[in-house]
Image (spheres, rainbow, N blue to C red):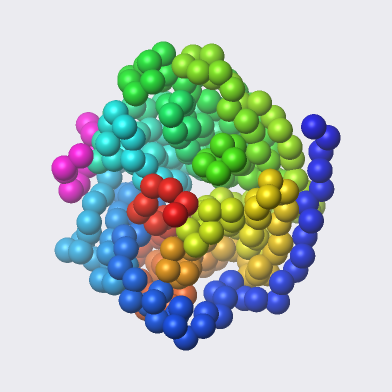
Amino acid sequence: MERRTLLLGLAAAPVVAALGQQQAQAAATASYYVGTTEQTQNKVMVFDKNKAFSDANRHWSFSPGGGAWANLSDVKFRATEAQGWIALVAASGGKAGIVNIGSEKDTELNDLSWSATPGGNPHAIERVPGNGSVVVASSDGKLTVYAPSSVGNLGSLAKVQTIDYAGAHGVLWDPTYELLWVVGKNRFSHYAVTGSKRATRLKYAAHFSLGSGNLGHDLQPDYTNKQKMLITATKGVYELLTDGGTFRSRQISTERSVKSYVKHSSGEVVSIKGDGTQPRDWANKTVRFSASPDRTRTGAQFYKARIWTTAFQ
């Protein structure tokens, strides 16, 4: 397929779009859990969004230590047929893995069901449902595909493919069209997943331009609409629209340094903006909510925020 150019339409709405009074009230009172990658303590931490983000209020955590697990950069929560609930995690230190959530409130390295070292500053990880494969996006410019010899057996995952992709930062499975979306330097793309077991491969389908000098940071669902996804990039926040199979996007905000942006099914937006201060200018001690009180954790450096759910709706 020929390279296609992204249709950009600058919208006047700010990052936190104005909600109708009734919708805003529903969003404010919605109850759900938020997963975060917190890089000071280097933990995945899950909290009830309606409670203070304190140790006493933690719902679940994963603490891998440091080294190649330093600077946790992504977490996604998925329900699987064989393993039940799992957490997909990636760390800029070079590692990626799958954590067995199980019944433990606080998990560590010994709770990993699988791990690998794709290297190159891993920034995102995703699983292909039904196929059992895992894809890691590393910002040095590559996608790494791991596939199982037996679907459902995490121990059988092994590297089967590496794809060059400049600035790879975000990766997300689209269950509606069964495509894998990727965002990186100046563009975002989708790939078809072909084959099964160790014969699994990503097949390039199309690239779309984000514009020059616009590094994509993150790619997340809009849980109010299964045919929308949300991209954060250097120059702002974008909606990726997929309805009718005609893929296009529009810019919904020009706010910079937004590292993480996701919309809950109630319409509430959860986001993190890099605060520009050292030692991690890409992180912030505050997780922002569009219809509820923001949550600040003293000394924390939050990088990504996720909704604890399994599908677009």
Q: The C terminus lies in which quarter of the figure?
A: bottom left
Q: Is residue 205 above or below residue 37?
A: above
- Name the residue furthest front: 244
Q: Is residue 113 above or below residue 287?
A: above
Q: Position of residue 72 (x, y in %)?
A: 41, 46
Q: Position of residue 299 (x, y in %)?
A: 34, 65
In depth, the one of 59 and 43 nearer the eye is: 59
Q: Is residue 288 visible?
A: no
Q: Residue 85 lies in magenta, yes or no? A: no
Q: Residue at x 80, y 32 (%)?
A: 1
Q: Position of residue 38 (x, y in %)?
A: 37, 55
Residue 229, picture quadrant = bottom right
Q: Position of residue 94 (x, y in %)?
A: 46, 34
Residue 254, picture quadrant = bottom right
Q: Residue at x 65, y 69 (%)?
A: 253
Q: Residue at x 44, y 33 (%)?
A: 129
- Name the residue furthest bottom: 21
Q: Residue 110 lies in magenta, yes or no? A: yes
Q: Is residue 182 left or right of residue 27?
A: right
Q: Residue at x 48, y 58 (%)?
A: 223
The mark total stands at: 0
In depth, the one of 8 and 38 nearer the eye is: 8
Q: Is residue 143 left or right of residue 296?
A: right
In depth, the one of 98 and 116 nearer the eye is: 98
Residue range highlighted in magenta: 102-112
Q: Is residue 179 visible?
A: yes
